[in-house]
Every structure is written in structure tokens, then in C-alpha cells.
Image: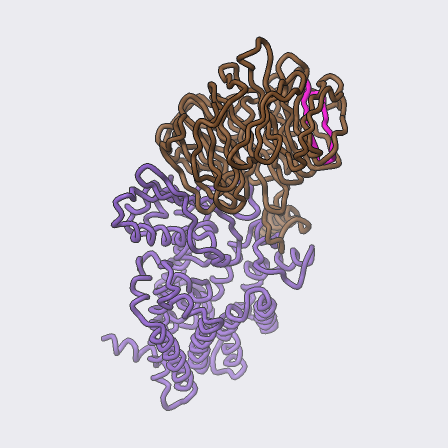
Amino acid sequence: MWSDYLRQQQKIIFSSLSLKTYGFFLTLTHLWTFLYWRNYNFFLNAQGSQNSEALCFPFFPNCDLFRIFIADSLWLTLLYFYAAVTLITGFFFLSDGQKKWGYYGLLILTFYKLFLHLSNYNFMGNYHYMIYILSLIYLFSPEKKKIIALAIVSFYLAAGLLKINVDWLSGAAMITTPWLNGRLLIYSLFYVVFLELFLIFGLYSTQKWIRYFTILQLLLFHAFSWHIVGFFYPLMMFSALSFFILQEYEFVKKTDSFQSLFTPLKPIKEHLPLILFLFVFWGMQALPFALSPDPALSGSLRLSALNMFDAKAECHSLMVAHRKGSAVHLEPPLKNLGVRMGCDPLVFLNQAHQLCRKNRKSTEFERLSLHLFSKRVTQHQYQNILALDDVCKIKNPLWAELSGTKK
Amino acid sequence: MKSILIALFFVTIGYLSYKANPHLYFFERDYFKMLTSPPVSAPAVFKKLDSSCVATAQYRHDEKRTGVAPTSAQPKSGVKIKKHILPFNLDIHSASKASPTVDETGVYIGNDSGWFWKLNHDGEKLWSFYIPNSLNGIHSSVAVDDRKVYVPTYNGFIYALDKENGELVWANLVGDYIGASPLLAGGHLYISAETSHPEGLLAQLDCNTGKTLWVSEWLGGHSHSSPTYDSENKQILLGANSGRFFSFSEENGKTLWQVQLKGPIKGTASIEDGKIFFSSWDKNLYAYDLKTGKPLWETFVGGRLQTSLSLVPERSLGITNTKVGEIIGVDLNNGEIIWRLVHGDTNNMFSVLITVDPQRKNQYLAWSRCNVVELCTLDAKTGKLIQKLTLPGSFTGVPFAFGQRIYISLDKNAGLVILE
């Protein structure tokens, strides 16, 4: 049954030039990922047994214990294997005779990357989140073209909504000094919000020049961001956006019609996958707002949603080991983790859990309390994000953040 | 409808863009600079322990920072070393910047490697609290009320500990560093903190919950001096390294008056009879009207002054060390120097302790470092030297009087001495 379903998906993909080629571009995202992880030895520094820190996704607690059992050389081999599968898959997508192996290659790459990714919270990032969604739609969903188009538009819309705040619009959320500054930068940041919330619908325009203009705007936006966020994010987005360029090619060649991207949702019954996507995607974006007092300051509660450069946080923690007859205020061992993770409650919880593990056998050790205070850099008032009297009693960091936030 | 929604969107974005001041923000790694006034911190609460918030002991003995020990403290001239506790300050500065604070329940003292202890009056350890991440450890002399001890440290936190067992009650990160001593007055806790760029701030905290009730405006420089309380005019007074001296409203932290001097103000101000006295690195001693902030007199003393003027009760007399190697007595009415005791210790930046002289009626003793390792006892009225005692090491902090004893924390690993 599964094999039939997969064969059906391949049929859909390989009957369209744009979808087939888009498979190649999705494969390219794995090459960018390899280069990003290999760059400055990032992957091995995070995974290697010498440096392996307790940074774990909440659904894979104590991941560092698993990581240290794998030798550094094996981690590196696994990474190069990833690169090799990427190159072979890319080749299959380009060759007509072996194209079905391209499909299976992308499927393997997606789950293989997920395995590597989930073994370390250090690898979290928006760029992966979006590509996973696009890949899953590409591999498994019916109405691929419509849903991929809708997904990309939804990404920008969600990102635009997150950016309606003083942090983004003032430039306070910038992680480095951009080329533009002063009022010019503020107008540019305003324009990004306008682009993501309004101009983005230009991708659905019946007017060719509006669609071209919108694609160009998006490409320029990501090209400009290169000097701020580095090479990886823009390359991932170029690959994702290639979908619309490939579609335009098909429109010109008249091998596809505009209707393949956009049709009215009525009758609803005929577009259930589309409706389901909208429901699931926007539900996931809403989740952090429902659970957290400020999603920009949360960690695991934000895993389901986009995590844009919409606000920069500053924070301080108070981790106290209570021992018999004394107490010690401990400094969390990890610092300078970057903009997204520096104030992530999950990072502090992970480190606290590691300390709990280390002290489990000590007779002097009574409990470990953890408090985390964060605020957006533009705010005056700190919020108590975590208030846990005995962090060692909490089994999973996901629930810890939920209970800590409620306090 | 569609047009109204679009217009509303633009108005919102436009407003946010307008609020975003491009001159304040971004690129600055130091985020404090983005804020026009200091951020308001929140406390981590560990247990509920309500106390009176009335000091049983604190830096310079009282909220007016007079440097005068209560009449129950009556150490005699001619004291000797009763006990010497080793070791003590071991780490970065190796200096006894924190002075001991002593009340009926024991001796509370921190050191520059981040350890804080409660000792009994004979110097035996009762409990400890350790802050290994505190750069330069504890520089502050702590404040104590009936149930809690308030410990500011150089990691920017102030901790409230249970006096009984050392358990953490609450902690609050007020700034980047705290070198000054806290003030317990008017039912609140005050602390001046430093921030890294540097600007500095004063915060009022609820002593039971640790909650920040207000923060002052930026001080424009580090705040090495500790706050002083004027109960009559409901104001908190504080100097800063920016050379500005502030009066803040007790109620909301708004600036009531301020003066600008030519040099940093590092010493803690002291209050008597509607006047406030403080020193500056501009080598002068100053007196201002407490209510209006009008200048009353200034006296050139010489040397970068960072001591506090200790005020001898009912004598209109202030005593301080100078950096030109002398202890001086100053007429508080006009700033005239009444007497001088030359000791030659030009690195002397230490304030003087005043106690009742139990051997002479209505007379006071002044206790001060008068050479690197020497503690001098003077007749407060005349400045006449009564005793010179050689200690096992130099000291940076201020002696603290309790009962018939004097407690002094010594530099490096020279320990803590109890004199009687």
C-alpha cells in the first residue's frame, strides 16, 4: 500500500518539469546544510564526544549521553555520508533514467537529516523547519504545487506578522551591523514587513510582471540579508523560492497553467489537503502564543512555529545548588550560544538536568533550583520565564517550561 | 472595509516606526544603551520569610550613615587582639573591601572570592553561602534585619538569606555589578548598582519579596557610593562617578534635586541637622542643604577624597581620613578644619568609626587606619592619639563595633580579627 502511494507521488512529480527540477533544488538544501555544518567544524564541535553538551530537543532528553557513545570519526563519517547521498540524489534528479531514485534519495536525506538534527538542539533553526515542511509536502502530499505555493506564502506571512513589533522595526533585532543604518534601515525594515504581508500575494497575481516583481523582491531581500545572517539562510531560501521561478518557466513554455498554483477554495471538499495544511500550519504558529507569555522569550513552546529574527532577548539566570548547610549560586556552563539560543529556556533546563545527573549520587546535594529572567532588548521589565524550585524532579524539559512559565 | 483595515495597518506600523528611535538602538552590543532609563529586574523567590525590614545592623551603622556605633557598643581604648581567624580574602583583589556587619545574632561577612559567612561572636562558622561566578566576590558590607541578611555581590545580584540557616529567600539581579552597600530604611531596601557601559542606577526593593519597586534614572557613571536615607524629607541620597550627586524621592524614585561636581563622588554621604556632607575626587569636602540641594560650604582638603565624613554626636564635628596622610576634624557649620592628625598614610581612603568612650563621660572615640597595618584610636573632640595597635595585616574596610568588641576584616589571607 505504501509503495503504491509512493509510486503515485513519483508519477505526480515526474509528470511536471517544475516539480521534478524542484526536487533537485530541495536536494541542494542538503548540500547547503552539509556546508553549514562542516563550516568552522560546527557539526563536530557540537556532536564530538569532547565537546558534547547537554543541549537536547525536549523529545530527546539526555541526548548528550547518546552522542558521546559515537566516536568523533564516526560522526564525521556520518556527515560525509550525508554529503555523498546528497550528491548522488542530485545526480538522479537530473538524469531522466534514474529519476525515481532521486525521489527515494530525497526521502532518505530528509529523514537522515532529521536524525542528525534532532540529536542536538544546537542545530535548531528556522531554515531547517521550512525546508522540512516543503520536503514533506513534496514527498507525500497530493496537490503538491498548490500546497507548496501556499506554504511558501504562509512562511512569509507568518514571518511578517512576527515582525510587527518595535524590536524589528527599530533594528534592535539585527544580529550584526547592516550596511544600511539610521532612518534608511528603519524604512527598509518596514518595507520587509510590507513585502511579507502584502506584496507576497503578488506571487498569486494573474499579471506576469507583478509575479516577476515579487519574486525579484524576495530574492533581493535574501541576497541583502547575506551579510547579516551568513550564507546558509539565503541559500536555503533561494532553493525554496526556486519553485516559483520553475513555475514561471512552465507558464512561458505553456506546459503548465496558472491554475495549478491557485484555484478558489470552493468547493472545499475538493481541496481538503489544502485546508488541512492551512489548519495545521497556522495552528502550529498559534501554539506558542497560546502557551507562552511572549513567544520570543520561549524555547520548547516555540518549536512548533517559525522562529524569525523578530526580537532579540537578553536574560539572566539563577541556578542554585542547595546543599546541606550551604548553598551555591552556579553559573550555567554554556555561554555565547547565539541570538536564538542565548536566552532559550530549553538551554538552561538542559544544563540544569545535566547538573542533576552529575549530582544524583552526592549525599550532600539536596536540590537544584532554576530561575530564568528574560526580556526583549527593547523592554524595561524582565519576566520570570522559569521558576523551578527543584528542577531535578522534572523529567522532561518541555513540561518544565510549561510549569515554570505558569508560575 | 478593506481600505480601513489597510489604513489601520499602516497607521500601526507607522507608529511603531516612529517609536523606534534610530539614535538609541541597534549595533550596540550593550543593550542597556537602548533604554533611556534602567531596566526593571524581577526577583527569584525561594521561600517566604517576612521580616521587619528595620535594620539591626548595616554599613556605617545607621541610615544616616553617620559612622557612629550605637551607644550599646562601647569598646575601650587599649583594645587587644582577642581572636584572629584565618584565612580570608584570597582571590582577585585580596582586599577586605567588605566590612563585617554584627548584630545580636552573629557576624556577617563576605570576601572577595565569593564566600559569605555567618559566624558567631567568637568567629566560629555557623553557615556559608557561595557565589563562585561573582567576579571580585563581595565588596559590600551587608545589611541585616530581624530575620534576613541582604548580600549584594559583584555579579550584580543582591541575595536575601535566612539569618537562621543561610537559606536563600530571594535573589534579584539589579545591575551588572554591585560594589556598594545596601541601605535598609523606611521599610524598604535600597541598592546602588553599576552597569557595564557605565551608567549606574539606584533601585528600591521590597525586602520581603525582592521585587523591584522603582529604579532611578541613569546616574551617568558607576555608583561606588552607598545610598543614604533622609526620613524627614523622604529622600534617598547618592553620589556617582559622573560627579553628580542625586536626591531621589522615596516614593517613586524621581530625581528631586541634583548637583554636578568636577570629580567622581565615591564616598557615602552622611546627614546631620538638615545638612548633607560628602567628599569628591575633586579634593573637596562639601555640605549641602538637605531639602533644597543648595550649597552651604566647601573645603579644600587635598587628595582624591573617597571617604565618608563621620559625625560626632552633639559636637557639630565631622572626622575623616584624607589622601594627603592625615585625619582631620571639620566644623560642620562652616567646613573649617579644627584639628589634624598627620599619620603619613597617603593611600588611606577609609572612613572612621565613632564610638562612645566608656571611660570618659560624654566623650567619643574615633577608630581609623592610620598606617598600612595600624589601627589608631583618637579622642574624637581633639584628634589626640590615644592608642596605636599593630594588626596582623593591612585593611581596606571599616572597623565595626559591637558590645565591647571591634571586628576588622584584613586584606589578603590575613584573616578577620576580633579586638577587645
Residue B396 in picture, x, y percent from top left: 57, 35
Front-most of residues B257 and B15: B257
To which quarter of the image does residue A21 belong? bottom left
Left or right of A5, for residue B359: right
Residue B31 in picture, x, y percent from top left: 58, 49
**Overall secondary structure of the magenta section:** strand
Q: Look at the picture and state if A234 lies above or below B350.
A: below
| Chain colored brown | B
Q: Residue at x 33, y 54 (%)?
A: A354
How many marks can you see? 0
Q: Residue at x 62, y 37 (%)?
A: B223
Residue farthest to the bottom? Answer: A97
Q: Let me know if residue A295 is in the magenta part.
A: no
Front-most of residues A214 and A69: A69
Front-most of residues B152 and B71: B71
Residue farthest to the top? Answer: B361
Is residue A404 something one can see in this rendering? no
Q: Residue at x 55, y 35 (%)?
A: B395
Q: Look at the picture and state if A38 lies above or below B311.
A: below
Residue A70 in picture, x, y percent from top left: 31, 70
Q: Residue at x 43, y 56 (%)?
A: A334
Task: Report the span colored magenta.
Answer: B274-290
Is residue B350 something one can see in this rendering? yes
In this picture the colour scheme is: by chain
Q: Let me know if residue B288 is in the magenta part.
A: yes
| Chain colored purple | A
Residue B178 in picture, x, y percent from top left: 54, 39
Q: Look at the picture and state if B33 lies above or below A81.
A: above
